[in-house]
Every structure is written in C-alpha cells, then in structure tokens.
Amino acid sequence: MNEQIFNDKNGLSLKVRKRAKAIEFFLASINDTDLHFNFFFTEEVFHDLISYIMIMANKTWDALTPREAMSCASDYDEYYDRKLDNNGYLSFSEKNYSIHITRPTISNLKMYQFNRRKMESLMFDINRCMPERIYVK
C-alpha cells in the first residue's frame, strides 16, 4: 500500500492512500468534531498533491482516460461509502490551491474514495482547469 501525507498552510494534513482498486483520502490526525474541511495548500504542495494522485491512479488502473462526468455516478463531486453508510463530497480550486472535502462521518478518518470512473472525471477537470500543467497524458 502506498501513501503520502500533504500538509496545508493551516496545519491540516491530508493522507492520500493507494489501494488495489481505489485511491482514498484520509484525515491524517484525529478530529471527531468536524465533517467539513478546507485544505489550503501552497502552490508547490498543491501541484505535488495532484501529481501524486495522478501517479497513483495510473498505478491503480490501466489505461485511464480523462472523461467528462455524464452522470452523478461518474462525477467525483459526491461518493457513497457503503461501509460508513453515508456520502462524502469533494471539490477543488486551482485558483487558490485548495481542496474542499466533506467526509461521510465524524467517527472515521476516511474522507473520500475514488473509483476508476470518478478518477477519470477528476482527471478531466484537472486538465480543463490547468491546461498549462500536464498531469495526465
């Protein structure tokens, strides 16, 4: 299992973990009071995070193709966690180098999980929003 921690400007830490068929985000430290998190990264850390996600995604799934989301099931904006029986939400802003996450529950550090189709949707948006940076070939 591969994982890396990315620290934001306000002291929050986001752990990115590669599993056999998923990429997961975790809160790197205990917090049992908040559901919503805004990670504000420096430009360098933000681009390192995006690069790491893309590298791990290409190791997780063969022949990933950036695709526009055509349904709620394929859009990375929301995911349903069966184990936690609740939804998680994710968005990012390339303008202020931030990621906004609402985790499914306060009782677990898991914040978000990408399947293949949601990752392809994220890749599409990254390429659209940041065409000057090549993360995905």
Image (cartoon, rainbow, N blue to C red):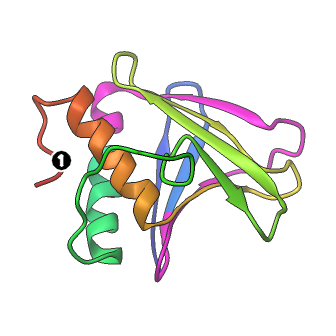
Q: Is residue 19 magenta?
A: yes
In the image, residue 85 lies at what x, y percent? 84, 61
Q: Can I make out residue 49 in this image?
A: no
Q: Is residue 88 above or below residue 113?
A: above
* Amino acid at circle 1: Tyr
In-front residue for pair 88/66: 66
Q: Can I make out residue 99 in this image?
A: yes
Identify the residue at horizontal 58%, vertical 25% (top origin).
Answer: 10
Q: Quadrant of the C terminus?
A: bottom left
Mark 1 lies on residue: 135
In-front residue for pair 50/6: 50
Q: Is residue 15 left or right of residue 35?
A: left
- Find the residue positioned furthest to the top: 95
The residue range painted magenta reads: 17-46
In the image, residue 95 lies at what x, y percent? 34, 16
Identify the residue at horizontal 26%, vertical 50% (top origin).
Answer: 51
Crowding near the residue tagged with mark 1, few <14, some 14–19, many ≥20 C-alpha atoms within 10 Å: some
Q: Is residue 34 above or below residue 60?
A: above
Q: Is residue 47 left or right of residue 23?
A: left
Q: Is residue 29 above or below residue 126?
A: below
Q: Is residue 25 magenta?
A: yes
Identify the residue at horizontal 50%, vertical 47% (top origin).
Answer: 71
- Badge 1 marks a residue whose secondary structure is loop
In-front residue for pair 44/111: 111
User: Count the marks: how many?
Assistant: 1
Identify the residue at horizontal 54%, vertical 55% (top origin).
Answer: 15
In the image, residue 21 lies at what x, y percent? 47, 78
In the image, residue 122 lies at what x, y percent? 38, 46
In-front residue for pair 128/103: 128
Q: Is residue 5 left or right of residue 78?
A: left
